[in-house]
């Protein structure tokens, strides 16, 4: 055994020891606790990354076709990001922004976000550390806004079924997926849910997109009428629904929804945590769809995941009310220790520099169009793929036992998880999403057409790898249903 092999074996052994410690002491988000602790879950220790590729402790390399968690827009291992973070750490590692204290990076970042990235009408920026805390802040701002205006009953919040807005108490309630509610006494009673804009899954058979949009609007109107517009403070919506299944809105959806909100004086919160900073081939999802939000939530692509940072953008009309509230009630008692953290803000500034210098928004539009076309070419006719959809560098395959009939796989089959695992075994990270069998893609915006070709080819091979097993599972499920029906059917005497 040569020196390289010996060193590699030593690293692998050390990695396995680290994973043992991990199982004993680290509580992971979104992870089956018993399977992880017992070692039944196949854990991986990620050790280094560059560009769109990430490597684990055993030296296995993967294409990260999900950019971490939609985060790493500029790709991994950027030296200019490391330099900016290190330089700011040496100059001012931390000071809070309470009571008017500030720092240069937070001030400059706020200016650039408002002047260069926000839709018209935005006025102020408030910082946190994650998309979840940004949306928690939005709920409090909506309540504060209506209290200042003397409308104490106007406090309910509307989100959409299958949406994702975080996993806190308020934001977990907003998230329209039952798995985020189970075991946590959620959702909060102030949170309501209206129809998802999922045309493929939810439209009436034979309905056009326009007819489906009308149905979504009618569902929202009926909810508002039932609850009373004078009790509803805000509506949360992702421009493109992300972790609920990567669902672009049907044509005409957002103008129709915004018209309802304006008519009933309901604040519109655009959750841009996934869609912001070029992901859709536009600066923001609001820009892409012509939205006019009262409040915006940003995170993930704000620093490309290099450091945790979120931003709440506040429109002029909402800020005017907040100022009025301060005159009547004093300082607003809301904030986080790390709001406007100087090192995180410096990372965001460096990130914006890279996005602008390398024209990654335009590149996401161009390569994203190629990604969408390649996925359609590869999977539109596949018997186990019911729907191919996406926009920009955000895409999904929805797996179906029968796509034409929109007949899903039984949940126990775990079809999308099988495809994701088969892709991982072939060196590709994709993500099984939402409450249905959806395989999601969100590559770094630096991905090339050649990278897209490789992503699509591996996905095709992964789906081929598991197709026989999926079909066999379907056959077993049908057989079990038939046997059960025979056992319970009345005797024909």
Image: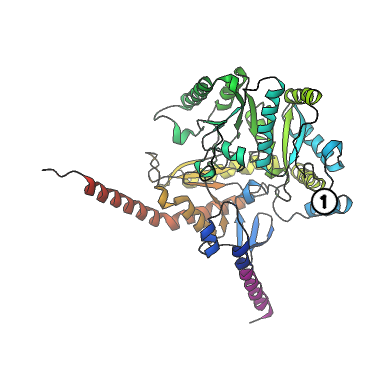
Q: Is residue 297 left or right of residue 480?
A: right
Q: How many marks?
A: 1
Residue 109 spot, x, y in % from top left: 80, 39
Residue 309 spot, x, y in % from top left: 73, 44
Q: Quadrant of the C terminus?
A: top left
Give the residues in magenta. Answer: 1-17
- Element type at marker 1? helix
Can residue 290 be seen from the camera position used here? no
Above or below residue 473? Residue 141 is above
Q: Residue at x 22, y 49 (%)?
A: 487
Residue closer to the observer: 205 or 191: 191
Query: Badge 1 is on which residue?
Result: 84
Q: How is the image coloured?
A: rainbow
- Please tell me whether the stretch drawn in magenta is mainly helix, strand or loop: helix
Residue 252 spot, x, y in % from top left: 55, 25
Q: Is residue 12 magenta?
A: yes
Can residue 334 be seen from the camera position used here? yes
Within 10 Å of disc 1 (Cα), the crowding (few <14, some 14-19, many 20+) is some
Residue 204 spot, x, y in % from top left: 41, 29
Above or below residue 24? Residue 71 is above
Q: Is residue 429 left or right of residue 102?
A: left
Q: Is residue 286 magenta?
A: no
Q: Residue at x 57, y 24 (%)?
A: 257
Residue closer to the observer: 384 or 327: 327
Q: Residue at x 69, y 51 (%)?
A: 75
């Amino acid at each position: 055994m040569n020196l390289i092999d010996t060193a590699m074996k030593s690293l692998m052994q050390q990695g396995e020891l680290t994973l043992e410690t991990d199982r004993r002491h680290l509580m992971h988000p979104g992870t089956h606790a018993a399977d992880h602790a017992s070692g039944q879950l196949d854990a991986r220790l990620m050790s280094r990354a560059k560009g769109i590729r990430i490597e684990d402790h055993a030296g296995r390399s993967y294409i990260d076709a999900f950019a971490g968690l939609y985060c790493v827009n500029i790709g991994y291992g950027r030296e200019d990001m490391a330099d900016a973070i290190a330089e700011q750490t040496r100059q001012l590692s931390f000071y809070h922004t309470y009571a008017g204290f500030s720092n240069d990076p937070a001030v400059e970042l706020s200016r650039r976000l408002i002047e260069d990235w926000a839709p018209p009408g935005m006025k102020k920026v408030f910082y946190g550390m994650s998309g979840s805390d940004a949306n928690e802040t939005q709920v409090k701002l909506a309540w504060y806004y209506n209290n200042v205006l003397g409308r104490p009953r106007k406090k309910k919040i509307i989100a959409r079924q299958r949406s994702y807005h975080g996993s806190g108490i308020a934001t977990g309630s907003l998230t329209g997926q039952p798995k985020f509610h189970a075991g946590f006494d959620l959702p909060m009673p102030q949170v309501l849910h209206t129809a998802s804009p999922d045309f493929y899954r939810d439209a009436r058979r034979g309905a056009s997109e326009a007819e489906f949009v009308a149905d979504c609007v009618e569902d929202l109107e009926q909810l508002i009428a039932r609850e009373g517009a004078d009790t509803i403070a805000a509506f949360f919506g992702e421009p493109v629904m992300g972790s609920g299944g990567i669902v672009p809105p049907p044509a005409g959806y957002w103008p129709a929804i915004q018209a309802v909100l304006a008519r009933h004086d309901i604040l519109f919160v655009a959750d841009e945590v996934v869609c912001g900073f070029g992901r859709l081939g536009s600066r923001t999802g609001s820009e892409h769809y012509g939205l006019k939000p009262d409040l915006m939530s940003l995170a993930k692509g704000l620093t490309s995941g290099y450091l945790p940072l979120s931003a709440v953008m506040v429109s002029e009309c909402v800020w005017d009310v907040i100022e009025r509230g301060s005159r009547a009630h004093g300082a607003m008692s809301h904030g986080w220790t790390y709001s406007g953290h100087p090192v995180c803000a410096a990372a965001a500034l460096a990130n914006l520099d890279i996005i602008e210098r390398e024209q990654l928004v335009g590149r996401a539009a161009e390569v994203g169009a190629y990604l969408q076309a390649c996925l359609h070419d590869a999977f539109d006719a596949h018997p186990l793929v019911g729907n191919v959809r996406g926009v920009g560098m955000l895409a999904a395959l929805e797996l179906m036992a029968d796509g034409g009939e929109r007949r899903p796989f039984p949940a126990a089959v775990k079809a999308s998880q099988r495809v994701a695992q088969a892709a991982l075994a072939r060196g590709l990270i994709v993500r099984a999403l939402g409450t249905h069998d959806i395989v999601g893609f969100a590559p770094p915006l630096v991905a090339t057409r050649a990278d897209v070709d490789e992503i699509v080819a591996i996905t095709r091979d992964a789906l081929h790898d598991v197709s026989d097993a999926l079909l066999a599972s379907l056959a077993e499920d049908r057989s079990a249903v038939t046997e059960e029906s025979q056992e319970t059917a009345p005797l024909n005497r």
